Amino acid sequence: MKKILMIIFASVLVGCATTPPPPAPTPAQIQSIQSREFDTTKTIAFASVISVFQDLGYTIASADKETGFITSASASTSKTDYWFTGQTINTQTKATAFLEDMPNNRARVRLNFVVTNKASTVYGQNRDSDVPILDAKVYESAFEKIDDAIFTRSATK
């Protein structure tokens, strides 16, 4: 009987084992996901990034061609839980871009997407959270659109 209980106990422990979460990406890995170089000038890349942000539904908050910095934000969505918490959560995605000149008439673009959640309750409590988007597919898609916009702008010159 003891042997059977030991086997059951061991199988329960093995069944409860979980795989550890993947390690957080290093800063170098994040930069690799978020950066891309293009065969174009900073001026054309800058206009292309602004155009793509607008095409994706972002509102440009600031843009400075000299520093190469662009900030933008998507429209926010709101969801209220009337039944349990009385909490309202506003969600918005913010995007920034940093552009710089590179040698040989190239431009480097680094993008950063962050999901911002602002929660508030009927009791006046507020809570904010920012979660960086680190999915490589999101950045690949944005860079493909920027590459298309650069191609279009370069073809018309």
Image (cartoon, helix red, strand yellow):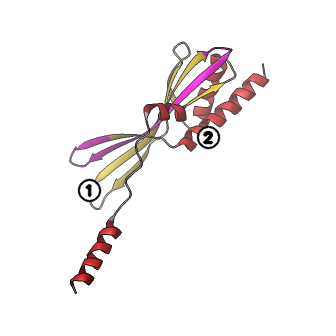
- Disc 2 is placed on an element classified as helix
Of the 4 image quadrants, the one containing the C terminus is: top right
Q: Is residue 47 visible?
A: yes
Image spot of residue 26 (x, y percent): 43, 35
The number of numbered discs placed on residues in the rendered structure image is 2
Q: Residue at x 54, y 12 (%)?
A: 66
- Please state which of residues 6 and 103 is positioned toward the viewer in this rendering: 6
Taking 6 as reference, is 58 above or below it? above
Decide if residue 51 is on the left or right side of residue 23.
Answer: right
Taking 45 as reference, is 67 above or below it? above
- Please state which of residues 73 and 86 is positioned toward the viewer in this rendering: 73
Image spot of residue 74 (x, y percent): 49, 38
Query: Principal SS element in the magenta part?
Result: strand
Q: Residue at x 56, y 18 (%)?
A: 100
Residue 109 among those drawn in magenta: yes
| Residue 85 numbered mark, or none | 1
Decide if residue 29 is on the left or right side of residue 50.
Answer: left
Taking 63 as reference, is 52 above or below it? below
Q: Which residue is tagged 2? A: 141
Image spot of residue 30 (x, y percent): 48, 34
Question: Distance from label 1 to label 2 (Cα)?
Answer: 37 Å
Q: Is residue 95 visible?
A: no
Query: Tag 2: Cα neighbours inside 10 Å, few (<14), some, or many (≥20)?
Result: few
The stretch in magenta equals: 102-128
- Disc 1 is placed on an element classified as loop
- Please state which of residues 21 and 57 is positioned toward the viewer in this rendering: 21
Q: Residue at x 62, y 32 (%)?
A: 52
Residue 151 among those drawn in magenta: no
